[in-house]
Amino acid sequence: MTVAGTFPAVGAALFLTSCAGAQVQNPVTSIDSQPVAPVAVTVTTSVLRTTQNAPRLDRNMQALSAGLAKSLEKAHIVAHPADPSETTPHANGSELALVVDIGTLQTGSAWTRELVGFGTGKSRLQSHVILCDERGTHVTDLLDFTVKADSGSMPGVIVSAWTPIGLGIHSAHALTKEALSDGHEDADRTAKAIVKKMVEYYRTNGWLPPENAESD
């Protein structure tokens, strides 16, 4: 009776879980009639830098800057990291400026996620993204959206393997996973979401062929 009674509660909890990923929110789009131009990628942050978060913040910023440029190139969008001297979009330029500002960085804990789950120890990265056209006398915003990335809310070992032996094995696995983590998984998820949004915009704008035409 006791065991049978636990299934609805566990089932309900499982129903509320979510996988790691990134969501695009509040997108604003303006169509541009000009020809496509190279994209200069800039990553900034409004997060207050501390001794504790500085290393991870730097890793996330570096991963976004390099990863975005590389991923955009793979998607046939000419891009490169912006020159440090021109990190702010300016008028009378020759490029498009993709500016990603990290506003929230929560490191979380892989160990807690692995053992407890259901959102405990969740990592979060929230970024404000703007694609600007610098090729006129005024800077024009072409894209404006927010990306929220996190590690998800999956059930932990306490639900799925509560025996002392199983708990010990999974605990060791979680500690190893934490040690091997590169610390910028949410940045990778963010970059993927940004590239997807950029590709959608480029196709809508006629700067890339339609998806079906590209696969032919």
Image (cartoon, rainbow, N blue to C red):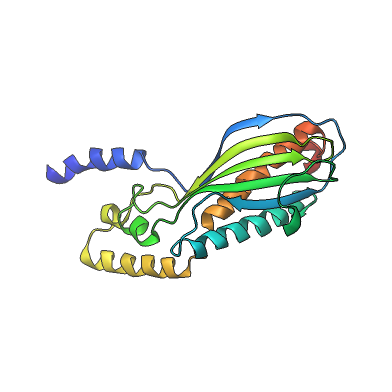
Compared across the picture, whether 88 is left or right of 174 comes to right
Q: Quadrant of the N terminus?
A: top left
**In the depicted structure, whether residue 161 falls above or below residue 127:** below
Q: Quadrant of the C terminus?
A: top right
Tell me where residue 207 appears, x and y as whole percent: 82, 38
Query: Along the line of sight, which residue is nearer the eye, 69 or 20?
Result: 69
Position in image of residue 3 (x %, y %): 16, 46
Residue 20 lies, with reference to residue 181, above or below; the image says above
| The image quarter in which residue 92 lies | top right
Please name the residue shown 60% across and 47% down the image.
Answer: 101
Residue 149 versus residue 56: which sits nearer the camera? 56
**Rendered location of residue 27, percent (x, y):** 62, 32
Q: Is residue 83 visible?
A: no
Query: In the image, is residue 4 above or below residue 80?
Result: above
Would residue 149 appear left or right of 7 to someone viewing this image?
Answer: right
Image position of 191 with respect to 52: above or below: above
Image position, residue 50 (x, y; %):
46, 60
Most extreme residue toward the left is 1
Q: Residue at x 56, y 62 (%)?
A: 58
Asked if residue 65 shows in the view, the reply is yes
